[in-house]
Image (tube, coloured by chain):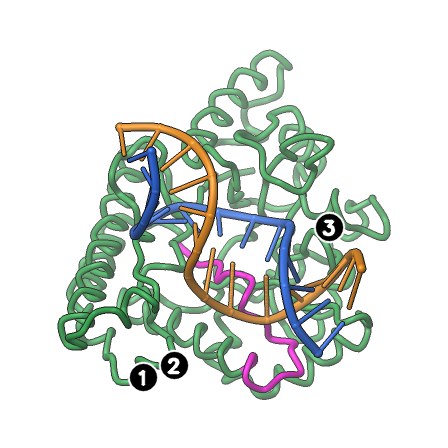
Chain colours: A green, B orange, C blue
DNA sequence: GCCAGTCAAGTCCCG
DNA sequence: CGGGACTTGACTGGC
């Protein structure tokens, strides 16, 4: 089984390479010259994209072939006061530079729009803004000339005091989501509201791949046993060109269980790999840890050491 | 040059 | 129903 590790958005090793520099709307409004303010936004966005490319080079140099882009690459991209800002045109070149690099150095990349994207809202404006944010993600992928299918991980959304109703509202709203956006989406179980089983219900019904978050499952489940649902989870990837992916992280502490720890507990991860051994030929694991790529490097070292220590046949997994 | 406070968003909790 | 916590990284302002 091939196990590929990835990390999120920024590096603890590569200095001064933030892909998430920003300008708030309050700052933007304070600038008297609107044209100049927009140019400043474009400079920030271009710097974010260039830093993104530096991160991809850093990944390549370190044999990391799985990466989540920041969702804050373009500040105020979908702000309602800036409908006239053609950021796609202005950022065409830096986006293409990323696309060109990825053609030379293939690497799985995707997005995880933040939790303000809520597709099961009953509020039309919230749904509209959510779609606007997803369109921005689609435009970024297109600008990078990346096939946009299965590139955005989302949570199901709000529970609204009635989870069954909230799940049905998701299905209702799904009909208003353009097919191009639908195709981008993967759904993930979350740590407070929608469990693996509930997320699977939607994924199976709507033909959406499910991203299993092991840590969220530990924090939020009706049944702690995830193994019985594993086959259903892998099946949601049956029609995808991409291998199954999941999220992996460790609790910061017993007291602060839902928060991400600096690193990933290698024993937990090793046990997980043993549990799924033989069920899939390849799995991509996104490490969500405070130490970002630092946690990836450490986990990779720990796994190699443990594998030797515990005399696990190296052919059972191979780090790519 | 550091530390505390602020900024964005939507949901959820509390009173 | 209104205000604050939650979350995240970046940025601002005070010293």
Main SS class of the magenta portion in the image = loop
Vertical side of A269 occupied by A190: above or below: below
Q: Which residue is drawn at 17% across and 61% down?
A: A43
Q: Is mark 1 on a helix, strand or loop?
A: loop
Q: Which chain carries label 2?
A: A
Residue A138, located in which quarter of the rendered image?
bottom left
Q: Which residue is drawn at 51% across and 60% down?
A: A114
Residue A55, located in which quarter of the rendered image?
top left
Describe residue A20's horizontal placement relative to residue A180 as left or right.
Answer: left
Determine which residue is flagged by label 3.
Answer: A230
Q: Do the residues labelled 2 and 1 touch (CB within 8 Å)?
A: yes
Vertical side of A9 occupied by A122: above or below: below
Was residue A117 drawn as part of the magenta stretch in this picture? yes
The picture places residue A96, in percent across and down from the top left corner, at 20, 64
Question: What is the span of residues highlighted in magenta in the rendered image?
Answer: A109-127
Residue A80 has which mark? Answer: 2
Task: Report, in whole angstroms, how far the alpha carbon at label 2 lies from the one at label 1.
Answer: 6 Å
Residue A234, located in which quarter of the rendered image?
bottom right
Q: Do labels 3 and 1 share a chain?
A: yes
Q: Which chain carries label 3?
A: A
Question: Which callout, 3 or 1, points to the residue nearer the camera?
Answer: 1
Describe residue A90's horizontal placement relative to residue A273 as left or right.
Answer: left
The picture places residue A266, in percent across and down from the top left corner, at 60, 25
């Amino acid at each position: 089984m091939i196990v590929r590790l990835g990390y999120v958005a920024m590096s603890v090793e590569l200095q001064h390479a933030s892909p998430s520099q920003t300008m708030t709307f309050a700052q933007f409004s304070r600038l008297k010259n609107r044209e100049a303010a927009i140019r400043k936004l474009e400079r920030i966005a271009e710097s974010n994209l260039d830093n993104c490319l530096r991160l991809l080079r850093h990944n390549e140099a370190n044999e990391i072939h799985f990466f989540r882009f920041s969702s804050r690459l373009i500040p105020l991209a979908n702000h309602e006061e800036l409908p006239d800002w053609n950021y796609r045109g202005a950022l065409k070149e830096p986006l293409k530079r990323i696309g060109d690099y990825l053609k030379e150095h293939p690497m799985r990349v995707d997005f995880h729009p933040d939790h303000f994207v809520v597709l099961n809202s009953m509020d039309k404006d919230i749904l509209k803004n959510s779609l606007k944010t997803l369109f921005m993600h689609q435009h970024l992928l297109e600008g990078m000339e990346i096939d946009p299918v299965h590139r955005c991980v989302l949570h199901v959304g709000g529970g609204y005091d009635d989870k069954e109703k909230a799940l049905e509202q998701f299905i209702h709203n799904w009909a208003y989501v353009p097919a191009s956006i639908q195709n981008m989406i993967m759904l993930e179980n979350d740590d407070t509201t929608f469990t693996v089983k509930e997320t699977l219900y939607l994924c199976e019904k709507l033909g959406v791949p499910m991203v299993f978050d092991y840590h969220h499952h530990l924090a939020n489940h009706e049944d702690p046993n995830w193994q019985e649902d594993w086959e259903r989870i892998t099946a949601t990837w049956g029609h995808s060109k991409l291998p199954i992916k999941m999220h992996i992280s460790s609790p910061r502490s017993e007291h602060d269980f839902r928060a991400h720890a600096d690193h990933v507990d290698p024993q937990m991860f090793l046990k997980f790999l043993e549990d799924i051994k033989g069920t899939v030929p390849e799995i991509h694991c996104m490490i969500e840890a405070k130490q970002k790529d630092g946690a990836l490097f450490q986990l990779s070292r720990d796994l190699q050491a443990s594998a030797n220590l515990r005399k696990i046949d190296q052919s059972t997994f191979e780090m790519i």
